[in-house]
Amino acid sequence: MKFHDVRFPAKLSFGSVGGPERRTDVVAISNGFEERNAPWAHSRRRYDAGVGIRSLDDVDVMIAFFEARFGQLYAFRWKDWSDYRSCKPSLDITAFDQNLGEGDGIQVDYQITKTYQSGIHTYVRPISKPVIATLKVAVGSVEMQEAVDYVVDAATGIIRFTVPPQFGASVTAGFEFDVPVRFDTNSIQTSVASFQAGEIPTVPIIEVRLS
């Protein structure tokens, strides 16, 4: 996968619109009931970066970023301001925000994930692009130290422990994260005249799967 480990300018993504989408195949059968099937195990996010452009200087930054990614060719990091932390927006990140699993005395690799819960139902989202500087990890009730107790693969979001967590110990983490995305267009169309008239370009962004 062609990927540049660089974040889209956060000041432009701040005003963007978008969020998760799901694919559900719905078939109406002859008795009036429906059959529904979800072929995607994970949701996919779409955004419009054009909404965040507020000045001609922003247009200049956008075009430079687009050109440096060769349009759709290279994926990149995107900060989704509505969902970029392991905890609620009003809380501080802690090492106990998200449960990544339990130790068995053998396993050393744990994927960073975020769990979304509504009632008794949950969805576990793999996080492949954590912001490493914000990551906090704990085993049981003890916070671990990076580079001593564990290392993190910034390309996959996998935590590897130096010593396997003991049997039954909860492995937890707190973090900020980005979404791996690419431009979903081959061109960006704008003009000084239309921009001054209050029109903004549409710049579609779509999440990509890296593994």
Image (cartoon, rainbow, N blue to C red):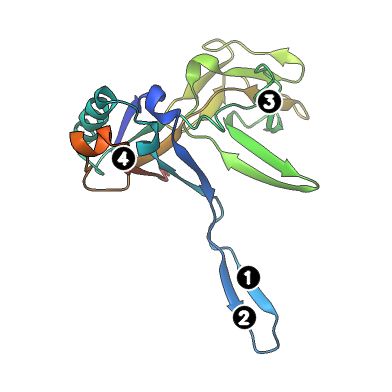
Q: Residue 123 at x, y = what percent? A: 66, 46
Q: Nearer the viewer, residue 210 or 63?
A: 63
Q: Is residue 112 above or below residue 90?
A: below
Q: What is the crowding at mark 2: few (fewer than 14 residues within 10 Å), some, or many (at least 20)?
A: few
Query: Residue at the spot x=44%, y=35% of the render?
Result: 16
Please, what secondary structure does the residue beneath circle 3 have?
strand
Q: Amino acid at mark 1?
A: Arg
User: With 114 as the anchor, is 155 left or right in this view?
Assistant: left
Q: Nearer the viewer, residue 189 or 167?
A: 189
Measure how far apart labels 3 and 2 are at the Cα level.
Answer: 43 Å
Residue 36's disc is 1
Q: Is residue 164 visible?
A: no
Q: Residue 26 at x, y = what percent? A: 58, 72
Measure how far apart labels 2 and 4 are at the Cα level.
Answer: 41 Å
Q: Which is more N-terminal, label 1 or label 4?
A: 1
Q: Amino acid at mark 4?
A: Glu
Query: Residue at the spot x=59%, y=32% of the render?
Result: 110
Pointers 2 and 1 in contact (CB under 8 A)? no
Query: Residue at the spot x=22%, y=48% of the render?
Result: 186
Q: Which is more N-terminal, label 4 or label 3?
A: 3
* Residue placed under numbered mark 2 in the picture: 28
Residue 199's disc is 4
* Residue placed under numbered mark 3 in the picture: 172
Measure how far apart labels 1 and 3 are at the Cα level.
Answer: 34 Å
